[in-house]
Amino acid sequence: MSEPLRIERDGDVAVVVLDNPPLNLFDAATFDAMERVARELVAMTDPADPDRARAVLVEARGKVVSGGVDVTYFRDIAEGPDPAERGGELWARLLEVANTFEDLPVPTVFAAHGLTLTAAFELALSCDILLAAEKASFGLVEIVVGLTPSMGGPQRLAERAGPARAKELIYTGERYPAAVLERWNVVNRVLPDEGFAEAARAYAHRVAAGPTVAHAATKRLASVAVREGARAADALVPTVSGPLFATEDLRGAVASFLSEGPGKATYRGR
């Protein structure tokens, strides 16, 4: 059997595939695979590698993105020795994965074609861009087993939609359609169901073809602004944006702009 989570390379895009039929549940093997995939993505997006991936796309196989976590995994922790300690260890592991995805130095895109619950939704919130098909729906439904989402969901929902919306979504445990979460600024774009997978791939390739080093600077400045304030991001600008003048991307784009006009530059990601 193939890994429940694996990486496939599509040109400049590293495609993370969730494939654990029939419901793509997150179980022990999937959590282990998440940690491995996160480590592989760090290596694949290393700025020192001339063949680095320049964007990451997360997609799923099957009718749903994920039906959530295999509840027997939680039962085994709750009924085993030292449940509080083991539960804390689980969340620490999963938060490290979420943080790794969030900190990758390239654009990250999550493509949700259908139902996206719990851990899959939290992984989506760790990505830069969340694309959703019209029929997609989302939920953090951990209240049904007496938990709160603990892979970064509450705090990252609060960043995108505000704390009141985050609490509402989690307190109710309801499933929310893509169109609603687009209005809440959780979903970036809702795309037609027909051709969704192809459109998501095209989007990932579009951002991969951009100025990769500049995109990394954008990610860092945006994150610092949200978590530390705009003035903290201002203070960081000389450090992260000054070096862009030394990149091949900038020099080539400026030359292209002056000779051919805007929008004709080809970037190499360095």
Image (spheres, helix red, strand yellow):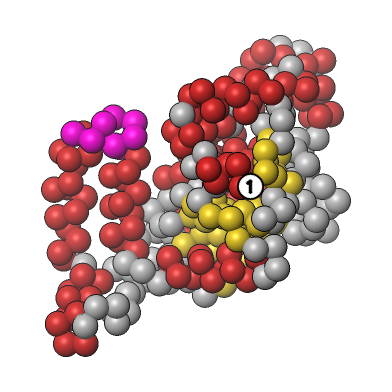
Q: Nearer the viewer, residue 163 or 95?
A: 163
Q: Main secondary structure of the magenta part?
A: helix
Q: How far across and how far down the image is residue 142, in percent?
A: 71, 26
Quarter-of-image position of residue 201: bottom right
**Residue designated by label 1:** 178
**x and y percentages locating residue 91 in the rendered image:** 60, 27
Considering every residue shown, the one lying at the far bottom of the view is 259
Query: In the drawing, does residue 145 fall left or right of residue 223?
Result: right
Examine the structure image and report whether residue 230 is included in the region drawn in magenta: yes
- The residue segment tinted magenta is 224-231
At horizontal 56% and vertical 59% (from top left) the residue drawn is 57
Between 252 and 199, the one nearer to me in the picture = 199
Residue 176 location, x and y as percent?
Answer: 67, 38
Picture residue at 36% right of the left edge, 69% below the top: 210
Residue 74 sits above or below residue 126 on the image = above
Query: Residue at left 35%, top 49%?
Result: 219
Give the amino acid at mark 1: Ala
